[in-house]
Image (spheres, grey):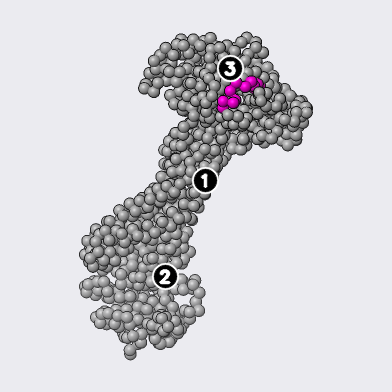
Amino acid sequence: MMWQNFFKTSVRSLFKRKLYTFINIGGLAIGIACFILLFLFLQNEWTYDRFHTNGKQLFRISSAYGEIDQPLTHTALTPSALAPALKTVPEVQTITRIYPKASLVANGEKAINESRFIYAEAPFFTMFSFPLLEGDPATALSGPNMVVLSASMAEKYFGKSSPTGKMLKIDGKDFMVTGVAKNPPSNTHLKFDFVGSYSSMNITDRWGSANYYTYIQLADKATSNALHDRLTSMIKGMMGSNTKYRFDLIPEPIADIHLYSQSENSTERGGNLQYDYMLAIIAVLLLAVACINFMNLATARSADRAREIGVRKVMGAVKRELFTQFITESAIITFLALVIGTVLSLVLLPWFNNLTQSTIRMHLEWPLIVALIAVFVVTTFLAGAYPAFFLANFKPVQVLKGKTPVGKGAALRKTLVVFQFAAAVFFIICTLVVGQQLYYIQHKKLGQDRSQVVVLNGSRFDNNSLAAFKARLLQQSEISQVSASYDSPVNIGGGYGIGQIQGKPADYSMDVTAIPVEKDYLQTMGIDILAGGKLTDADIQDVTREKQEDRRYHFYLNETAVKQLGWTPTEAVGRTMTMNGRIGSVKGVMKDFHFASMKQKIQPLIVFPEYEWFGEILVKVNGRDPQRALARIEDAWKSYQPGRPFDAHFLDDDFNAMYESEFRAGRLLKVFSGLVILVSCLGLVGLAAFTAEQRTRELGIRKVLGASSSNLVALLSKDYIKLVTISLIVAAPLGAYVMIKWLSGFAYHINLGAGVFVVAGLLAMAIALLTVSLQSVKAALMNPVKSLKSE
Amino acid sequence: MIQLQNITKYYPVGLGRNFILKDIDLTINEGEFVSIMGPSGSGKSTLLHIMGLLEEPSEGQYLFEGERVDKMNEKKRTQLHRGSIGFVFQAYHLIDELTVYENIETPLLYKNVSASERKSRVADVLDRFNIVAKKDLFPNQLSGGQQQLVGIARAIVAEPRVILADEPTGNLHSDQAKSIMELFKELNEKDKITIVQVTHSDVNATYGNRIIQLRDGHIRS
């Protein structure tokens, strides 16, 4: 058959031109492998919580609050009293409250701290589509002390046997296992290993604190707008004639939470649409760069095929048949690349998951299959159509007369090479700038010293046990400071406000961020005091008096807060003030330090001792031997918290977690710009090999006339220097634009200097020249007698 | 069979024209074996290409089997290439990636000949040219003479009415050339195929029954 004839010619010609075939298939396979990985990643990102059967009716109620003329603070957390209040709202059909709380789980002696533990109300499994493998979704959480396990947890705690009806000790209480849920997929913001019944927690319904997630299912004909209006009027009824403060409850569609929610404190860090788009562009660009290799090499190598085309035409082949033949060849290459690329992506998936900190698996489901077919068709035609058209249009008589239509299409080839290198230069620029900014973030003087600080869970200590634990730790020579705080020093919460302060009108108020701390917090964190003194034991007694009304607080304000009040640090010290009902005075002024992400400007901050509850214990260790110090801390932990797992991490990790998506983007950029460069270079190797071969005779003549080898290398490299220069001119403004935009997302950032562009340019130039010169040197060193004989 | 009337071929050079062929009048009848001779650059190859519909004359009329070629559409010309005209080249021009068998089969594929008939026709030709043993070899595994033999086999397998040969023995030594010319003679006499060859060699020219001398684009009679 004709197809066989095409097929044989193609396959044999691919075998004959091994370098060319390797470059084409290799480049495309890399492109396709990356495409598949990024496709899976983006598919996961963009299908978050779209699998719930009644997903269109599911909403999370989030809250927004703040002063009337200030930007609102959005949080996904709501007060526990919201759910009962919603029961009377006709738009709401079902409600479930969720309270995530890491819990100690034991089947027998050994207790394990399980962090993916949530408590939820009874409708949880009927509202959300998390299918139960065992148990009844309607009743699994219907009473106190019931728990549903994920399939993997069922196996972890009970092995192969069915856990339903068996007992587990959870935080010391007996729970009955009432069901086993299929492991939640990677594309949900509600990932759980355990779901306990909400009623086990004895939570009273209060408006005062917002620590709970409220999810609702809309009634059949209701709209979210109607619900929002209803909520707004409900709040109006409760807040009365308050004109200073705003509070809003906003229904967020469940499928929008991952990508679009602005609410903080979500159950899972949201996606970053900006980076997702960047990845999509990378996936397409990489594939385009590989296609360009194919086009360039195919047209450049056309001389090779010219005779065959001429002969076929003379035998009566029409353009259409020739076109089909070369498209077939393109399809064969693409298909091989597709197979290799798919295998490659499977092999690289664990590494990619590690790189992106995701848990994607490859399922051969229809979106991926459709995408692969689309990639196959598009690549086959994108890469093959132009060369096929180009080759099919050869005039046979020229070919058969011995004139080979070389040099045709050179302008297009050059344009495409410029495109490839512009892409490479662009990515080099981005990688350099992102790398610099991340370095800046990690190494900027923060005003506090977070290095060598070990963070422990303080939630189980009371004031006495904490003091004893602290004293025990301080006996160790490896440990220099111990303190504690309400929350992580890199995650200080807002929601406080200065009320009356001496020297301001009675109705003055100012929103601040604040953190309750233990006595030695400022020393442990290495925060400088500009005015005022250290905390004394007497100060601590002031704040630990039995009765709330007897307590006197001591506040440390940061420079920004003092500046906003219009005072110098020394002017501020000693003034009386109140903060959310706490009466006290300004004890001192702290030098400004970064307590939040560098994306935000430093806000007014108050640090104050308050011994109500400490979430985190902070241990400053000596730098010499952190492992030894950790072992000492663990020893002490075991005697004060027997039976509780020892979970310690360095504060640096918390800090880096704030920039998780930036670090991820940085890592991805590094890898993918490397790949863009690699694939571009592959193409360049092929093109350079071709040029050198094509100019063999010219080089031979020049050599006979007295040109040195270095003359010839320079001659061959000159063209490529020109191309890289042009691509630099194209890519630099684009890279600058994109990076300036990205940097503007940080309140504190590096300045974009010329250095980055110089380095990017030199790097691209060096890589291109190195690639090209391999071939040039080979051609230049060739014995001219040989090359001239070949004519 | 082939009628050329006032055929002229020129290329524009600067403001003037560079004439390759000028006012060629030539008729070749069915069954003839014509040799076109002349020095380099006299326009022999161009004349052959025009006869083979690979090039178009700048002026003049060309009738193939009484039909005006210049009035033919692309499809009709393709039909002539597929069925009526066979080419033999000095450099053989076999497809390197295909075996001897596949090379010979290719024209039949373009002619949409059925698989079984292709098989028998290729087998016949291989047999006739005594190259059955070589059918699975690739062109680069053959000597020049053998390659040209395959070239001719490929040209006749589609049973053309006319074979146009452009210096078919130019790359061969004299023994090989002799057998190729004898083959042409046999094809002409036994199979009644019209043959037009371009040649430099007086010896080869004598195998034909008419010699046309070209000089500077004119026929010297």
The residue lying toward the viewer, choosing from A700 and B19, is A700
Q: Amino acid at mark 3?
A: Glu
The reply to whether residue A453 is visible in this rendering is: yes
Residue underneath mark 2? A395
* Magenta-drawn segment: A569-580
Name which of mark 3 and mark 2 comes first in the sequence: 2
The disc placed on residue A546 is none
Q: Is residue A618 left or right of residue B19?
A: right
Q: Is residue A23 above or below residue A619?
A: below
Cα separation, mark 3 vs mark 1, equals 43 Å
Residue underneath mark 1? A740
User: Which quadrant, please, contains the N terminus of chain A?
Assistant: bottom left
Tell me, yes or no, whether dots 3 and 1 are on the same chain. yes
Q: Is residue A575 magenta?
A: yes
User: Which quadrant, please, contains the C terminus of chain A?
Assistant: bottom left
Characterize the local packing of mark 2: few (<14), some (14-19) or many (20 or more) Cα atoms within 10 angstroms.
Answer: some
Cα separation, mark 2 vs mark 1, equals 51 Å
Question: Quick check: marks 3 and 1 in contact, CB under 8 Å?
Answer: no
Quarter location, residue A540: top right
Characterize the local packing of mark 1: few (<14), some (14-19) or many (20 or more) Cα atoms within 10 angstroms.
Answer: some
Q: Nearer the viewer, mark 3 or mark 1?
A: 3
Residue at x-position 51% and y-position 24%: A529
Residue underneath mark 3? A610
Name which of mark 2 and mark 1 comes first in the sequence: 2
The image position of residue A657, as x and y in percent, is 50, 30
Q: Is residue A21 above or below residue A745?
A: below
Quarter location, residue B194: bottom left
Q: Amino acid at mark 1?
A: Ile
Q: Is residue A670 above or below residue A764?
A: above
Question: Quick check: marks 2 and 1 in contact, CB under 8 Å?
Answer: no
